[in-house]
Image (cartoon, rainbow, N blue to C red):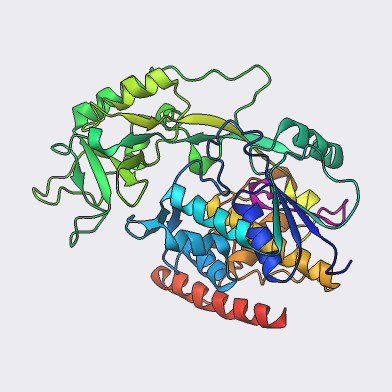
Amino acid sequence: MTMNTKLKIIGAGLAGCEAAWQAAQRGVQVELYEMKPERFSPAHESTQLAELVCSNSLRSNAVDSAVGLLKEEMRRCDSLIMRAADATQVPAGSALAVDREKFSRKVSRAVEQHENITLIREEVTRLPSSGGPVILATGPLTSEDMTKSLVELTGEKHLAFYDAIAPIVDAESLDMDRIYRKSRWDDDTPGDYLNCPFSRSEYTAFIEMLGNAHTVPLKEFEKTKYFEGCLPVEVMCERGTDTLRFGPMKPVGLAHPVTGKVFHAVVQLRAENLDRTMYNLVGFQTKLTYSEQKRVFRTIPGLEQAEFIRLGSIHRNTFICAPELLDSGLQMKNRPGLFLAGQLSGVEGYVESAAMGLLAGINTSAVLRGNEIVPPPPATALGALIAHLTQSDPSRFQPSNVNFGLFPPLEKRMKKRDRGTFRSKKALMLLEQWQQDG
């Protein structure tokens, strides 16, 4: 292959846009295919590229956390997704959250204006049988036709579980006499989160109502297999009365900033945009019916008159058994030239999906130059994700967010509070060496 060969990328979500950007920045001519607006998945609404569906949060921005480190590594690799996220962030304490619409517009504009990227608005229903390299980045909601085409290649190696989306409420409909502003453990500023406090009796009543609420029924052929990091709130409720109080409704660090009162449970709301006109219910992804969501969630203190801008929903998430099917370059073992990126490759989360797009773009560029693909060192966040995808036990493989448990063991003992900083410094040093060698 030569640099004159065009790279075809199917899917213009986070991973596809990131892959296109990385390849185009290296002089590769890219054809980026996006089925919207010709066709929309059940969870997508906007015609913009890189649409965020489940949440507007990209999680912790602290470099001594695994996901914060991954973001920093991506920034140092000139990530388009991180450029857009940093430019459109909204207040969210130590987390990086973005204004969804501005974020998507910024990514879309960068892709559309790049001289090496041709955006083609049409659906691709089958994997190309020949030609140059292809990156498949169709995401967790890959269409049925493309899924069938992928199954023809993988056999029955693909898996599926269900992801749930949290509701969004109109800020003007909130009762700010009951709700207070505070970020967890933050006593010096008003805080970026809105908090809805529960007394013991209010919490008990809420749990009982939630436990008896009606959910959207699954079809006979559907098998629920939820990702543990994104469980529907009603599924958590089924696990015990106090499960939510030790999960998304945890009151720890959220004493009232004026009275100092500690509550039995708290529901947090996070801003969806810079103007703070919309808030999402943090950790309240759900498969309740629309009518039940309104009935149950309006019993949350401060949400009695809430107007829902978006209600929660449930959708299919498709991914492959990466340890059996992918090599360390994100290339299909039985189909050289076909690369997978994003959640379809077996990672979980916005940042992780974009990170796999970043590597896919870098790797296909190397192939087009006739160079060997060299994966990032396993002690980097990027490399740790690749190791998870390629070295996990296939019989127990599950998608994963980045975490330090995926990294190689530490070479020496140290205090827990020092481990994140140590890992981050080492990772960024190794990343720099990897970039120089590449």
* 99 in the magenta segment: no
The outermost residue toward the left is 259
Whether residue 200 sits left or right of residue 319 in the image: it is left
Do we see residue 80 in this rendering?
yes
Location of residue 60 by image quarter: bottom left
Percent x, y for residue 52?
Answer: 51, 45
Frontmost residue, 18 versus 263: 18
Location of residue 155 by image quarter: top right
Do we see residue 66 in this rendering?
no
Residue at the (43%, 62%) spot, across then down: 87
Whether residue 393 sits left or right of residue 385 in the image: it is right
Whether residue 197 sits left or right of residue 125 in the image: it is left
Residue at the (39%, 69%) spot, across then down: 417
Quarter in which the N terminus is drawn: bottom right
Relative vertical location of residue 290 with respect to residue 149 in this rendering, above or below = above
Relative vertical location of residue 356 with respect to residue 234 in this rendering, above or below = below
Segment tinted magenta in the rendering: 332-346
